[in-house]
Image (cartoon, rainbow, N blue to C red):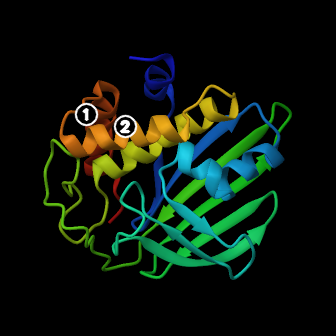
Amino acid sequence: MTGDRVAALEQPLGKFVDRHTFRYEREYTHPPERVWDAITMPEHLNAWFLPYNRTELKQGGRFHMTFGRDDSDQSAWCGTIAEFTPPELVDYAFDHGGRMRFELRRTERGTRLLFSQYFPPGFKHVDGASENEVSGTDLPGGPDTPWRPGLLAGYHGSLTSLGTYLDGKGPTLEETRAMLETIKSGRYQDPVNAELTVRYRKLIKETLPD
């Protein structure tokens, strides 16, 4: 396991804000302007988050995110930028009613990032993935909830990758593409992600608000 992957296990888990909102908090030793570019510009998102992204960087601009699927995949999550205040806040409002919000706060050491994921009441995943604990697509909070342990573990790992990326140590787009191809082939094994999935499954069961 590489150092950045192991570092993910040392980062704090996210927390529920309410039954429909989950939030992570991270500290980066880089100014908000540097972090802002990484969370808004597609060429950066494609590397540390997941390809493929297309974005009109303005209030009301349209965006298109495939989260690792083929760029032509019809299940891509599209939407409109609801709030855009460089270099402090970008709120991605998906057409399905969900939100993905990045808030940046300047600190003495660099930047504090608050990353929130919101799903509206009644949201259902439509990607065709069956509930499976191995892949983390199960719903430990109940069938009326959207919170998959693998999803939360994936965000957790991505925020660790963001720190590595900001430090200039990767991942590159080519490395991320290679990882996705390994996942598609069924040969991908990541003990860190597996452990994070276990931790988030436990967190969902124990802390999801009524």
Above or below — where is 76 with respect to 33? below
Query: Disc 1 on helix, strand or loop?
Result: loop
User: In x, y percent, where is residue 59?
Assistant: 74, 78
Q: Which badge, 1 or 2, comes first in the chain's sequence?
A: 2
Choose between 1 and 119: the one closer to the eye. 1
Q: Residue at x 51, y 23 (%)?
A: 4
Give the tally of numbered discs. 2
Taking the image as shown, residue 204 lies to the left or right of residue 82, namely left
Instruction: Write the residue at 65% across / 53% down.
Output: 39
Q: In which quarter of the image is residue 165?
A: top right
Label 2 sits on residue: 179
Give me the disc on residue 188: 1
Rounded to the nearest whole Å, what is the CA distance between mark 1 and mark 2? 8 Å
| Image position of 24 (left or right of 198) | right
Measured from the top left, where is residue 90 in percent x and y?
69, 65
Relative placement, left or right, of 37 versus 204 is: right
- The percent position of residue 15, horizontal first and vertical second, equals 47, 49
Q: Which amino acid type is marked by label 2?
A: Met
